[in-house]
Image: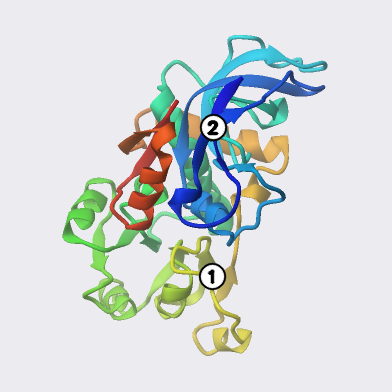
Amino acid sequence: MTKGIRIHETGGPEVLRWEEIEVGSPAEGQVRLKQSACGLNYIDVYGRTGLYPMAEFPAILGMEAVGVVEEIGANVTDLAVGDRVAYAMQIGAYAEQRLIDAKHLVKIPDSISDETAAAMMLKGLTAHYLLFRTYPVQPGDAILVYAAAGGVGLILCQWAKLLGATVIGCVGSEEKAELARQNGCDHTILYRDEDIPSRVRELTNGIGVAAAYDSIGKATFEASLDSLRPFGVLATYGNASGPVEPFNPGILAPKGSLYVTRPTLGTHVSTRELLTEGANRLIDVVSSGSVKIQVNQSFALADCAEAHRALEARETTGSTILKI
């Protein structure tokens, strides 16, 4: 037997239980992983609270981790026992061991530590699809990044700066503003004290930004739209303040023929080709040191309720990992 964190019902952090689980042997196309660390993401909170419904209970949360292949099922040809691998968007990461389809795994080079690998897959692949697919950032573009001092935000800021963008980061405190500036942000907006669209217009000579990457959702939807230049793209990719309410698409015309999209990483890693393209680019940029993964908090997996509380209270910056 091995251990993991399971929920038997939705609710607050108190529903997260550290208990024995049964893993078994891998089926055809699967491997059994011994995991060393997993990443903490807001999507884990959505699963715990029921915003994203679980298929059944008890359920194991967690969407990214790093580990070593312990056993291989039939017809797995590109992995071997002992390979160090990581994955994202495969629920069930909050466990010492797990079974997973080999097609979802990416080999991790020695140049990337377990801590970095556990923190970078979901957030880094999210940053990748936002910057390269949702709105392909061009040199000279101004962009708006919400939660700029968070896990995805710090990666977005660094990578966008590398691509030649002018990065405007939205943060909740001066401490977080300083962290964002240290990681590629040209300008910061304190959303509690400043009007976001007005400040964006001031920083862009009245033009607005090419894209707003908005992980907040309901509370910032209108501010994001009003910050865009004509033909600008709003990528609302998270729900930290709750889901965006239904709106009349007719409002997009007078605001500048705007585009709104609600992407998810699941689509962007849904084929092996999409996954490897994003993962290879992410591994390259992290291995080179051009983008640094900031692991600013670490908890034992058994204590992940404490980690959830800190995340929801906005007490974290950068990435948080759960050590196994």
Taking the spot 61% from the left edge, 16% from the top edge, the residue there is 69
At label 1, the amino acid type is: Pro
Say left or right for 249 vs 11.
right
Can see residue 155? no
Hey, which quadrant is residue 177 in on the image?
Answer: bottom left
Q: Which residue is mark 2?
A: 19
Q: Which residue is mark 1?
A: 243
At label 2, the amino acid type is: Glu
Hey, which quadrant is residue 140 in on the image?
Answer: bottom left
Of residues 98 and 89, the one nearer the viewer is 98
Mark 1: few/some/many CA within 10 Å (<14, 14-19, 20+): some
Q: Position of residue 63 (x, y in %)?
A: 56, 41
Image vertical order of residue 171 relative to residue 92, above or below? below
Q: The C terminus is located in which quarter?
A: top left
Mark 2 or mark 1, earlier in chain = 2
Of residues 88 and 53, the one nearer the viewer is 53
Residues at marks 2 and 1, CA–CA distance in whole angstroms: 32 Å
